[in-house]
Amino acid sequence: MADFVGVDFYEMDEMLSDEQRLVRDTVRKFIQDKALPIIEDHQREGTFPISLLPVIAEMGLLGAHIPDYGAGMDALAYGLIMQELERGDTGIRSFASVQGGLCMYPIWRYGSDEQKDEWLPRMDAGEVIACFGLTEPDAGSDPSAMRTRAERDGDDWVLNGVKYWITNGTLAHLAVIWAMTDDGVRGFLVPTDTPGFTANQIKAKYSLRASDTAGLVMEGCRVPEALRLPLAEGLKAPLTCLNEARYGIAWGAIGAAMACYDEALRYAQVRVAFGRPIAGKQLIQEMLVECVSEITKAQLLCWRLALLKDEGKAHPAYISLAKRNNVAMARNTARMCREILGANGILDDYQTFRHMVNIESVYTYEGTHQIHTLIVGQKITGESAF
């Protein structure tokens, strides 16, 4: 497999620091050498490549942007990590994104000092894998409609409910569960070996086959008050976690698009039709130019968003705009690249179709394309259309 060199039409490498470039190149090599040789087997079997986890943890990728308890990288370096992981597979990026953005982040932001010291070092080291339980079978885009309840019983809380589409669900040692209480939404840290807690793998998937996806069931699941996130009050708390994950998704989508474009370009340069490589055909060049144009715009969008994030100015609508734009871009790019590959594009000898079906999930999860449209719409008009 030829080494990936990246898409850098506007010479954005010049804007990266030596450290940021080193982080990206290190993860890029890891994906090239360790992930890509095995990912298709896991795609066929519908299994997560768990053998990669020790290396991912050792590289500091799980808590890459968490201060004090993780690597504490800046937003741009973290984004480049997500980009390269998703260039390997959405399932790999999703794993790291959930562990860091959806699980370590709420403990760091909303947890007690004791909770931080107990969980974050082990999560950063990959000793404890976590999942994030917000979505339910009937509460996706409208999380306020959640039915999972937590009732106070002395010094404990008793949780009952179902969560669905949960990444890392059957791998997890710890679940960050959001539940409705008499005082509104609250967050709880639930060890997955707690009596009354079960995780059931969702297997019948065409998309995200190399990702662990589960349904969580809590029936009389009892946790102590010490495992409630003390600073998490209301629905705003889980939504801030989603913003962390959505930021990583915006970068990850670029990685998926670059993987497809790189493969299609290389193919077009060697595939001969009517006596010459198809890269010399006008219609093929039009598709390749569309791909590189949209990837470049997405890169510039994320670069500016990273700077705003480090300055504390990344409004949720800015993140929504990037997630909405970049995932749609990756979706369209994958489809055009599949066309360039012709009939070969449906074979798993090529990676484009795998990315194409994976991006269908990304288009929906962490806020659908339409939900992000309404978030941005509210920001620019001042009117809620939800």
Image: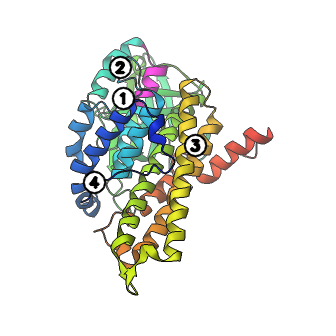
Tell me whether the residue at label 1 lies in contact with that at label 4, contact meaning CB atoms closer than 8 angstroms.
no
The front one of 353 and 203 is 353
Tell me whether the residue at label 3 lies in contact with that at label 1, contact meaning CB atoms closer than 8 angstroms.
no
Q: Quadrant of the N terminus?
A: bottom left
| Residue annotated with mark 1 | 63
Q: Amino acid at mark 1?
A: Gly
Q: Earlier in the sequence, mark 3 or mark 1?
A: 1
The front one of 52 and 3 is 3
Tell me: 22 left or right of 238: left
Numbered disc in front, either 1 or 4:
4
> Does residue 140 appear in the picture of this structure?
no
Element type at marker 3? helix
Q: What is the number of the mark on residue 69?
A: 2
Query: Principal SS element in the magenta part?
Result: helix
Element type at marker 4? loop
* Magenta segment boundaries in residue numbering: 103-112
Q: Amino acid at mark 2?
A: Tyr
83 vs 358: above or below: above
Instruction: Name the residue located 57 percent from the left edge and 49 percent from the top edge.
Output: 297
Q: CA distance from mark 1 to mark 4?
A: 27 Å
Q: CA distance from mark 1 to mark 2?
A: 7 Å
| Residue annotated with mark 4 | 3
Q: Amino acid at mark 4?
A: Asp
Mark 2 crowd level (few <14, some 14–19, many ≥20, 10 Å Cα)? many
Tell me whether the residue at label 1 lies in contact with that at label 2, contact meaning CB atoms closer than 8 angstroms.
yes
| Residue annotated with mark 3 | 301
Q: Amino acid at mark 3?
A: Leu
Mark 1 crowd level (few <14, some 14–19, many ≥20, 10 Å Cα)? many
In the image, residue 7 lies at what x, y percent?
A: 43, 52
Instruction: Name the residue located 32 percent from the left edge and 67 percent from the top edge.
Output: 350
Tell me: 170 left or right of 286: left
